Amino acid sequence: MAMPSPQLQQLLELGSKHMRLLAYMVAVSIFASGVYSGIFHPKIIALIPFSIFLSFGLSWLHRRLSNRLPSQATAIVLLLDGLITGFGIASIQYALVPMLVFIAMLNASALSFGNLFLWIFTGFFCLFGSLLGGMLFGFQAGVYDNTPTAVNVVALIGAAFYFGLTAFRSREQSRALINAQHQIREQQDESFQLSRKIAKYLPPQVLESIFKGKRDAKLQTQRKRLTIFFSDIKDFTEASDEMPPDLLTEMLNTYFEHMSKIALRYGGTIDKFIGDAILIFYGDPVSRGTKEDATACVSMAIEMRREMQILRQKWQSQNIDKPLHIR
């Protein structure tokens, strides 16, 4: 079977967690290479364990918010990501290549799990975070021009891993979505086939009320005022003894088909066929009122007698000499 929607949702949440963890690992690598190269302030070392903590902390926060504020959880966490990213940009002294890597990863995350409006707000939070970080680490006169090649290489390799794994995750999610669509189509086909099978044994009004959720398919007792109609073919037993079985079957099928169309046209609920008899009632599951139901039932019976005259002429043309009457 294909992956159901709860598992698909779990895959999406897991993908968000892994993307965030990978992005923060790239940041840790840049911090470590910059401190090792001697271009970043030594106190940046404290950001390495703090970044790892933030990655797991934000994932935990997202799970908690998903239970309480499901429609706002992703937005809140993305805005915090933007604020932290801006702070990280200031901590690396606005070095050009690492800064662009940070911004690219933030944009990818915001566009993957948010929308254009949220992406813009995430950018504003990133700018605000960079200003706060600049107050703490100091502002540079411009973009840092003397970034060692090693730091740039680490940043680019980290970006390659990040976007490569992100593309792989997107492909897996696309497969999961395709599988989910296949499952939905299979379930729709199964439901359609089931409804067609049930339709053979339930009146259309009852079937419609069940599938639209107006009533449950369960045994229950209700007291209603109904108009009951019962009809059968006069002297049908004697007539059936004189007719071949195939001709008798064809005649009954024609009779039931025509009478059923008339009953449905007047809003009657066909309860059952018993041999050559038909049982129809008005007032359930839909009632237009006691008087209107009774009037519709009588009108239906009159049209059935008229239709029977047409059918008798048709059967006589098929050499069925014995006239059939309903009562």
Image (tube, helix red, strand yellow):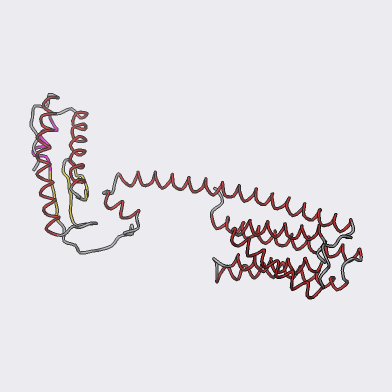
x and y, in percent, of residue 271 in the image: 22, 50
* Residue sticking out furthest to the bottom: 136
Provide the residue span drawn in magenta: 232-241
**For the point 19% across and 38% down, which residue is it?**
258
Residue 81 on image: x %, y % = 69, 66
Pick out the residue farthest to the front: 141
**Place of residue 205 in the rendered image (x, y in percent of width and height, measured from the top left):** 26, 51
Residue at 21% across / 33% down in the picture?
249
Q: Name the one closer to the observer, 294 or 107.
A: 107
- What residue lies at 18% left-to-right and 52% top-to-bottom? 281
In this rendered view, identify the residue nearer to me: 111 or 309. Answer: 111
Q: Where is residue 157 in the image (x, y as percent from the top left)?
A: 81, 53
- Residue 98 to residue 319: above or below: below
Q: Does the magenta stretch include residue 183?
A: no
Horizontal side, residue 185 vs residue 193: left or right: right
Left or right: 111 with respect to 180? right
Question: Which secondary structure dominates the residues rendered in magenta?
Answer: helix
**Residue 143 placement: quadrant:** bottom right
Where on the picture, by quarter, is residue 105? bottom right
So how many labels did they put on this image? Answer: 0
Image position of 63 with respect to 264: above or below: below
Q: Which quadrant would the C terminus be assigned to in this image?
A: top left
Residue 239 is one of the magenta-drawn residues: yes
